[in-house]
Image (cartoon, helix red, strand yellow):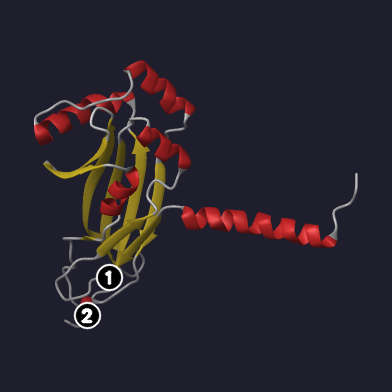
Amino acid sequence: MCPIGRGHALLLALFLFAAPAAQAQRGVQLEVEVPAAPGAGATVTAVNLFADDDMRELVRSGFPAQLHYRLELWRKGGLFDDREHHEEWDVVIQYDPSAQRYRVLRRQKEHVDDLGSFATLSTARVLLERPAKSSIVPDHDKARYYYALALDIEALSVSDMDELGRWLRGARGGTAATALGTGMRTLMLRLLGGEKRHYEAKSASFIPANIVAP
């Protein structure tokens, strides 16, 4: 076997170094911007959703995908920080094979919003990646705060399908369209690796009294 030349070795090293970096760049990215005005909440942005190949194929195969957001507002303390407020919301996207459309729903507490249907997963993702405003704000003007965001993306398992069906029927008064039978869904979910994907981000720290109104 011929030894690898110095130039080839360098190219190979550059490729091995760049591949993980490129993969990380394509991954889901979260950003939490501090309030832009007094009395306002943070702005949350998630981009490169469904960059994971397995998760994207699960959605295209008819598995509903749930995006669960949890945003927490923390007040910095001496030894320990205190969580002052938090809010959670879910977004579900499901492919309807009969209409050949991707339907998007948003749920916060008991309120459900139908955000529409889209011809492609890419166009649905544009909606999902729009910046969202938070409603939780600091209680103290002169304390130092930061926001912590967690996002879980998962393909819903068979045990979740009944709950999703009730959710969909409550949102529009219809039944959830599915591309696969229950048994096939279970098998595919195991084969394609439908476990939960977890992502986190934290904002810069800020003092509300230092925010200047535009």
Q: Which quadrant would residue 11 be assigned to in this image?
A: bottom right
**Residue bearing the label numbered 2:** 211
> Which image quarter: residue 60?
top left
Residue at the spot x=69%, y=60% of the render? 14
Splitting the image into 4 quarters, where does residue 72 fall? Answer: bottom left
**Residue 122: percent from left, percent from top:** 34, 48
Q: Position of residue 78 (x, y in %)?
A: 34, 70
Q: Nearer the viewer, residue 136 or 113?
A: 113
Instruction: Tell me the crowding category of disc 1: few under 14, some 14 to 19, or many 20 or more residues within 10 angstroms, Cα based.
Output: many
Identify the residue position indicated by label 1 in the image: 34
Residue at 36% across, 43% down:
153
Q: Which quarter of the figure is the N terminus placed in?
A: top right
The earlier-in-sequence mark between 2 and 1 is: 1
For the residues bearing labels 2 and 1, Cβ distance under 8 angstroms: yes
Residue 206: image x %, image y %?
29, 75
Instruction: Residue at 33%, 56% (x, y): give it.
Output: 46
Residue 95 image point, x, y percent: 29, 34
Q: Nearer the viewer, residue 80 or 128?
A: 128
For residue 54, side relative to residue 108 (left or right): right
Up/down of 3 relative to 31, above or below: above
Judging depth in this view, the residue of 109 and 81 nearest the camera is 109
